[in-house]
Image (cartoon, grey):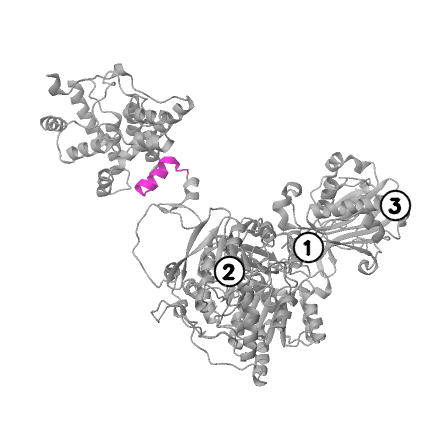
Amino acid sequence: MSAKAISEQTGKDFLYKYICTAAAVQNRFRYANVTAETDFERLAKEHPWLLTERLVVKPDQLIKRRGKLGLVGVNLDLNGVQQWLKPRLMRETTVGKAKGILKNFLIEPFVAHKQEEEFYVCVYATREGDYVLFHHEGGVDVGDVDAKASKLLVAVDQKITEDAVQKQLLAHVPNDKKSVLASFIVGLFNLYEDLFFTYLEINPLVVTADGVYVLDMAAKIDATADYLCKAKWGDVEFPPPFGREAYPEEAYIADLDAKSGASLKLTLLNPRGRIWTMVAGGGASVVYSDTICDLGGVDELANYGEYSGAPSEQQTYDYAKTILSLMTREKHKEGKVLIIGGSIANFTNVAATFKGIVRAIGDYQVPLKEHEVTIFVRRGGPNYQEGLRVMGEVGKTTGIPIHVFGTETHMTAIVGMAMGHRPIPTQPPVAAHTANFLLNSSGGSSTPASSRTASFSDNRAAAAAAAAATSSPAKKVKIGPPAAKATNLFAKQTKSLVWGMQTRAVQGMLDFDYVCSRDEPSVAAMVYPFTGDHKQKFYWGHKEILVPVYKNMADAMKKHPEVDVLISFASLRSAFESTMETMQYPQIHTIAIIAEGIPEAHTRKIIKKADEKGINIIGPATVGGIKPGCFKIGNTGGMLDNILASKLYRPGSVAYVSRSGGMSNELNNIISRTTDGVFEGVAIGGDRYPGSVFTDHVLRYQDSPGVKMIVVLGEIGGAEEYKICQAIKEGRVTKPVVCWCIGTCATMFSSEVQFGHAGACANQASETAVAKNEALKAAGAFVPKSFDELGDIIKSVYDDLVGKGVIVPAAEVPPPTVPMDYSWARELGLIRKPASFMTSICDERGQELIYAGMPITEVFKSELGLGGTLGLLWFQRRLPRYACQFIEMCLMVTADHGPAVSGAHNTIVCARAGKDLISSLTSGLLTIGDRFGGALDAAAKQFSKAFDSGMLAMEFVNKMKKEGKLIMGIGHRVKSINNPDMRVQILKDFVKQHFPATQLLDYALDVEKITTSKKPNLILNVDGFIGVAFVDLLRTCGGFTRDEADEFVEIGALNGIFVLGRSMGFIGHYLDQKRLKQGLYRHPWDDISYVLPEHMSM
């Protein structure tokens, strides 16, 4: 949603902080907030003026006409305010149809004034600009301001002036007040623009000799502009409409939505309700709510909400568990139903999102059964068959009644089933699997011949005329801006640029081109400013092709003059700039803007520029559009299985226009099942101000010979559908128009509900879906009784046209085939391939990183530390606490042993040679081996073998001496029995205290007694100690079998301890040399013995 209401206090706070005007604005920041928790003594200390001035008190909860309702206390002292609040604060009251609790009040200074000093001013946004309304008589009795007020339209990109305000708005204002009011209104309008307001009303605005007083204020701001206005707005709280409580679950979902690229919405209507919904898609969510209300379920409808935009499994899980938690808190005598519905997805992997829902159902299976919940599922889109299968399986395993349906079932049929109005099929039809559509049976690699190039109903003359009209724009570069927008947007030769690295969408377009038997791909190039110019690999049927990618738009346009369409996947933050740049190039005549959440002020500037240039805009907030057999925008129409199932590879006779992208795909399905198919379809987008409107496309379809009938899926909010009525009445549109406006349920709700699309909100009676449907029917459009009947009406009109000979159906030709991508075939479980790698320690694929089966959050909650983490990653076990501590101690004692040892020396020399950290560290690590640092494994192996064979310590020493081998882990250059190594002593004390048994360590200490008796420095050194102690740890901690423990020693795990620990020291030496700025090292001559070769010295 874009336009969101803010509290009066927030609105005034913005005004007082940021308005710039010569008028003296009085009582700045003089307001106090009162709730049930307010301490009036403390409030008076914080706002001393409460004790010295007369006061006004009123609820601040988005209630209109408070004065008329007796909800304003006037001219009171603080005690009077408290008395006035007693019968009202936290009491239920009725405002219109809405019942709610009065819980938030505002106290302000009372302003004594005369009636003639009250004025009315309002600024609100429209498509063409912003209107300023002014009336010289304000106050509670202002009446119908739309009819009475003077109006000034400030067009998009124009500036307001005091002169224009005085001339057009202040004609009936006394002369002594004109200058002050003009200055204030200009300042107010500039504030409105700067802070991205969409509505700002002050009534009354009082002007006295002292200055200007803002008494009552109502406002809405464009919430999508948060990234632009955050510094000024701060953290804005958007209160719910009066009559609807603000639930913490709604705030939780709103927070998820804000952090996600997907769309997640939740509004609680009746938490005690029996009917709950979990619907995918902004348009579909409205249709399901409509159908529930049409069937008499308005009082039992618990929630409104939607999830869309390909949410992740975790996001869907979080959304689903929130709804399941809410619906299992209070039992209903008739049990409850959950409707998991949706239209046919364009790009969301249905199976992937259903995994999150299935997880949530599994978690809540006990309360779901206790509350007698029955679940109905209907969905289509990529991999929906697998999603439905998984959903059906969870019903069988949990015992929860779950009924699943696919695209063979009308979208809202499950509502009638859930509410007992239609029977539940015992054996629902099974739709063909995705693979059945896509596997290539021909075996050929060439582009197949086209199955059809024109609509079934086109005669040759019409087809020729259409071809002539459509073929030239794609090949020809426009010299200047066109006089009018193109009637035909796409042709078989249309070439496009794609802004953004959307490889999946581009591949989908190329597959569509191939199945439509286009001669060349429709994507000429891509623009992506975050990389250099390069080529991106794609498939064209069986072959691989390269599509150029450019860093900047200018290069792409210059090298591809045949391009006339831009498809913009730019983010909501960059879409405005990139679109405005695109419109500088006269060759572009159509731009599709996919991003949702572009501020309305930016969209209106785009529309204005496009109108000046004669450019067609589709979007923002759209999936795009499709012209079967010719061209498709991005992800429109979904994947190839849906393209082929809905016969979108060749043109039909029916053209449609919709706001919703998901519902446009549902229309593809409905039209393909009831007629000869789609000629063209466009989703104009769900924003309040789409780049093109319904009539733009309806009139194009009227002028297109191939279109024989038109379908419009309208929506609550706005007045564009009335232009269709006018066009039908005036005879401008003569082809049959089937139209249905969704959102009929809105008039049944007691409080305002903002639906999934930003534009789906009625601001007056004429903008309701019910009023529009009635007007369309009266104008002569074919209007069904509900969305349930839309397919029947379309079929009836189509059959009538066939009967009259207007449409002549042709024989269906089997579509050409396209090879399936390996990744998608694997997703569908059609193929298998041995993995190149196997891993068992870490999995990063899910929502959360997993170490050896333990989620990273659990790793931190359990406080495993570095030792425990190493245990998971190296030994695949959760080790005992003492074992984790021992590992950390080993890392600490092996971290460094001074700069003289070979590893540190190498690291220092490398660092001083100017090498980077990685090179210097590697240089030091490469010295580790049997002679330096690598004795841990060797010591463990030697001592273990001797001990396990039953050899006495003396026998082991004698054996090694006889074989002429060193005992690894014995001996030290500096330390001795008389000068012990404190590192060994620290480790020995810990091991003796905490380890269950130390058999190998005791054996090594016996060996040490023998060796030190011969030479005092032949002690068990730190490498040897760690080696033997680690063997004891692995063998006695209880986590490993004997074979597993021996295997870890054999594969070199213990040397890893020294490598990891000493890496810390090496890095320290590297940083030390850099910090000390040491120069290139050269070894001194006097430390080198120069000798001649042996044969020469003799």
Q: Give the structural element (helix, strand or loop) at label 2.
A: loop
**Sequence-earlier tag: 1 or 3:** 3
Asked if residue 295 can be seen in this view, the reply is no
| Residue placed furthest toward the top | 1086
Q: Dot 1 corresponds to which residue?
A: 241
The percent coordinates of residue 685 (x first, y second) are 60, 61
Q: Dot 2 corresponds to which residue?
A: 634
Instruction: Give the magenta-colored segment's residue range.
Output: 863-879
Is label 1 or label 3 in front?
Answer: 3
- The amino acid on which the numbered mark 3 sits, given as a three-letter code, is Lys
Is label 3 or label 2 in front?
Answer: 2
Is label 1 or label 2 in front?
Answer: 2
Residue 867 magenta: yes
Say left or right for 905 vs 574.
left
Residue 89 magenta: no
| Residue placed furthest toward the left | 962
Q: Which mark is residue 881?
A: none
